[in-house]
């Protein structure tokens, strides 16, 4: 199947998912944003709102303020579900820049918008925050989320008065498609440094202790301009294994990189200031230079930058902004894998490719131990996650009317896995059968699972922080299922083996999802104004806090539903939650307040006694 065909199939399935959710929610832009957000690698999640004024050419769909680095992210959606059947819908730079300007106008007109807004409106909080913080905000990132394909990939430049740095990030369906394919496993590719770029890398070989070891290590530098050109040509492929891939210049580290590159006097110091990149390749064409320990790297197969994604992206951004990179070098560590076709391990034969993937994953993990990493990507390959995936592929959903089971839940261990799984099958009967077995509404991602778990277990403030933080805490609470503990007994023996999850554990995970869906449906039917996600997390947590002993998770799994007797109680809790969040926040941003443990503790203290009298 050619790439254009794969992209069209991916697009059709993606749009179909959004449309189905949109028909329930009554809007399309918000479900589309929610589907794309898991692919955008940020540590926190934006608050989702909706503001659009055609006459003012202003629009905003979400925002995230990072107070520690004085950075504001603004999200604006361009969603169009209709396109020619056999043609990729393309977007031009001019078209997308107008959407970026809509978000910019929201920022520059925040004071006027705030004065006209009712305090109960969702967008009031962000306008007030912009007005209060305007003198402090140093960087604004505008994310344009589009259902089209931005194939030219030209940078979009904007400026905002009194804001030092403005970045425009385009997240189109092409970028989402590439990332979803990358998550499923890397397709091998060759980069010919000498043949394609006219310059081979020259690096020093680190001596091996064994003649035929599993790796060869080389250390040296790569010209910054060449690194930028490579990233420009190969893009996401170079950082598929980097747990911090796709990050743009943001935050303290990247700001320092950017400033060093801009300053002609400091440019030569870049190699001293920056830790460089770590990389790995599956094979290479390498030639020794004379009798020296220096080697010429002419070609690399499946080259991956496993640490230094931020450095690479920042250099690329400077390159796109016409910063002179001559004389700038990036220190580089290169690992070449030398794994034979079959390898004996513990009297068992292991497949070469499986061991390569495992080694690259380990190299990625250890190379990133000093950084804040994306836990959900890093831990996706643990046995714990794999076991949940296996249960989801094997356990049928109970049927209540004596018919045979027809469908299962689909746990998505890697982003985009479900859509890729569909498109691996022939259109027609094969895809229809797959969708019948795994309906779209039964897909649950690892970060969604974590948020549902944390809410039910009494951590709605953690769920409110977003999927990455929820997943990190979820993995911490369940570490006995994936992490070897080291407990020494009286005989000096190390105990504390990893525990295997069972089918009941999996069923209870799904039961928490079912409860969350039940609460979500009720909250959406109430048309509450504002803070939808926080209201849902806190309502679920309070329901569990007050009535958890009366709600049997295994019964919820068996019935695939929560009894309707809880409807009125959920409505009352949800109303109380919204009022509490608004009133207790005071002058604070409500969304930020909901992320604090004191918010949850206060909710228990103020409301639990009253709400417990409802049943």
Image: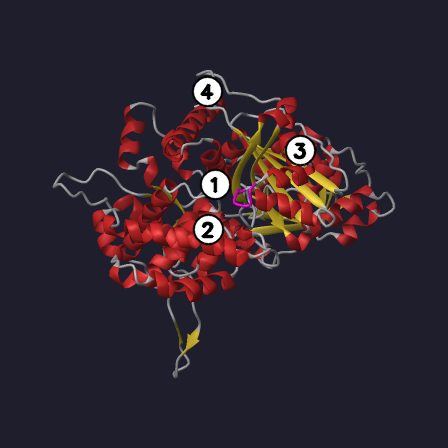
The label on residue 105 is 3
The label on residue 607 is none
Q: Residues within 10 Å of mark 1 (few under 14, many from 20)?
A: some
Residue 309 visible in the snapshot: no
In this rendering, the label closer to the viewer, 1 or 2: 2
Judge from the rendering whether residue 35 lies leftward or rightward of residue 372; answer left or right: left
Q: Nearer the viewer, residue 61 or 414?
A: 61
In this rendering, the label closer to the viewer, 4 or 1: 4
Judge from the rendering whether residue 96 lies leftward or rightward of residue 514; answer left or right: right
Real-space Cα distance between discs 3 and 2?
A: 27 Å
Q: Residues within 10 Å of mark 3 (few under 14, many from 20)?
A: some
Q: Nearer the viewer, residue 578 or 558?
A: 578
Sooner in the amino-acid sequence: mark 1 or mark 2: 1
Q: Could you tell me what secondary structure mostly forms the magenta stretch?
A: loop
Q: Are marks 1 and 3 in contact (CB under 8 Å)?
A: no
Q: Quadrant of the N terminus?
A: top left
Whether residue 120 is in magenta: the answer is yes
Residue 65: where, in percent of width, then height?
Answer: 62, 48
In this rendering, the label closer to the viewer, 1 or 3: 3
Residue furthest toward the left? 402
Sooner in the amino-acid sequence: mark 3 or mark 2: 3
Whether residue 391 is in magenta: the answer is no
Q: Are marks 4 and 1 in contact (CB under 8 Å)?
A: no
Q: Quadrant of the C terminus?
A: bottom left
Specify start and end residues of the magenta stretch as a single range.
118-122
Residue 594: where, in percent of width, then height?
Answer: 51, 55
Kindly identify which residue carries mark 4: 82
| Residue that appears at 39% across and 65% down | 480
Q: Which quarter of the picture shows residue 169?
A: top right
Real-space Cα distance between discs 4 and 1?
A: 27 Å
Kindly identify which residue carries mark 1: 183
């Amino acid at each position: 199947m050619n790439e254009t065909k794969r992209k069209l199939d991916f697009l059709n399935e993606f749009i179909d998912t959004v449309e189905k959710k949109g028909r329930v929610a009554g809007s399309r832009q918000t479900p589309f944003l929610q589907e794309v957000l898991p692919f955008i690698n940020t540590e926190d999640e934006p608050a989702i709102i909706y503001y659009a004024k055609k006459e003012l050419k202003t629009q905003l769909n979400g925002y995230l303020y990072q107070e520690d680095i004085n950075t504001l992210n603004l999200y604006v959606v361009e969603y169009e579900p209709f396109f020619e059947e056999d043609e990729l819908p393309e977007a031009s730079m001019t078209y997308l820049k107008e959407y970026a300007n809509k978000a910019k106008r929201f920022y520059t007109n925040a004071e006027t918008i705030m004065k006209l807004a009712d305090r109960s409106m969702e967008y009031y909080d962000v306008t007030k925050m912009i007005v209060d913080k305007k003198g402090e905000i140093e960087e604004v990132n505008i994310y344009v989320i589009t259902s089209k394909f931005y194939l030219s990939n030209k940078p979009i430049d904007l400026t905002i008065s009194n804001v030092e740095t403005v970045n425009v990030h385009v997240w189109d369906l092409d970028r989402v498609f590439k990332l979803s394919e990358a998550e499923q496993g890397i397709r091998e590719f060759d980069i010919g440094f000498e043949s394609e770029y006219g310059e081979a890398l020259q690096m020093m070989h680190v001596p091996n202790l064994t003649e035929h070891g599993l790796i060869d290590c080389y250390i040296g530098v790569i010209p910054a301009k060449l690194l930028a050109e490579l990233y420009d040509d190969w893009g996401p492929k170079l950082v598929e294994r980097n747990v911090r891939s796709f990050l743009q210049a943001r935050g303290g580290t990247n700001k320092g990189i950017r400033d060093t590159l801009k300053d002609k006097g400091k440019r030569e110091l870049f190699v001293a200031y920056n830790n460089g990149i770590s990389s790995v390749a599956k094979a290479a064409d390498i030639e020794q230079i004379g009798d020296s320990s220096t080697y010429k790297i002419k070609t690399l197969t499946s080259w991956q930058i496993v640490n230094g994604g931020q450095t690479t992206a920042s250099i690329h951004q400077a390159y796109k902004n016409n910063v002179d990179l001559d004389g700038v070098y990036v220190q580089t560590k290169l690992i070449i894998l030398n794994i034979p076709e079959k390898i004996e391990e513990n009297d068992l034969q292991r497949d070469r490719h499986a061991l390569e993937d495992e080694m690259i994953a380990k190299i990625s993990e250890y190379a990133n131990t000093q950084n804040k990493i994306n836990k959900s990507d890093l831990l996706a390959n643990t046995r714990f996650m794999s076991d949940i995936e296996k249960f989801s592929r094997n356990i049928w959903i109970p049927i209540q009317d004596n018919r045979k089971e027809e469908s299962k839940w689909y746990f998505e261990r890697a982003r985009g896995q479900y859509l890729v799984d569909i498109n691996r099958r022939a259109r027609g009967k094969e895809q229809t059968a797959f969708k019948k077995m795994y309906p779209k509404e039964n897909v649950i991602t690892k970060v969604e699972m974590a948020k549902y778990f944390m809410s039910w277990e009494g951590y709605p403030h953690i769920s409110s922080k977003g999927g990455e933080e929820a997943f990190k805490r979820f993995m911490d609470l369940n570490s006995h299922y994936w992490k070897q503990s080291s407990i020494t007994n009286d005989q000096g023996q190390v105990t504390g083996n990893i525990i295997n999850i069972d089918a009941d554990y999996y069923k209870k995970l799904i039961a928490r999802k079912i409860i969350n869906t039940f609460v979500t449906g009720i909250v959406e039917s109430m048309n509450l104004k504002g803070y939808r996600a926080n209201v849902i997390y806190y309502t679920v947590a309070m329901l569990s806090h007050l009535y958890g002993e009366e709600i049997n998770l295994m019964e919820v799994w068996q019935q695939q539903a929560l009894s309707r007797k809880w409807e009125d109680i959920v409505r009352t809790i949800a109303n109380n939650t919204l009022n509490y969040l608004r009133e207790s926040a005071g002058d604070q941003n409500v969304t930020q307040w909901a992320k604090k443990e004191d918010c949850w503790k206060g909710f228990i203290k103020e409301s639990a006694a009253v709400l417990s009298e409802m049943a």
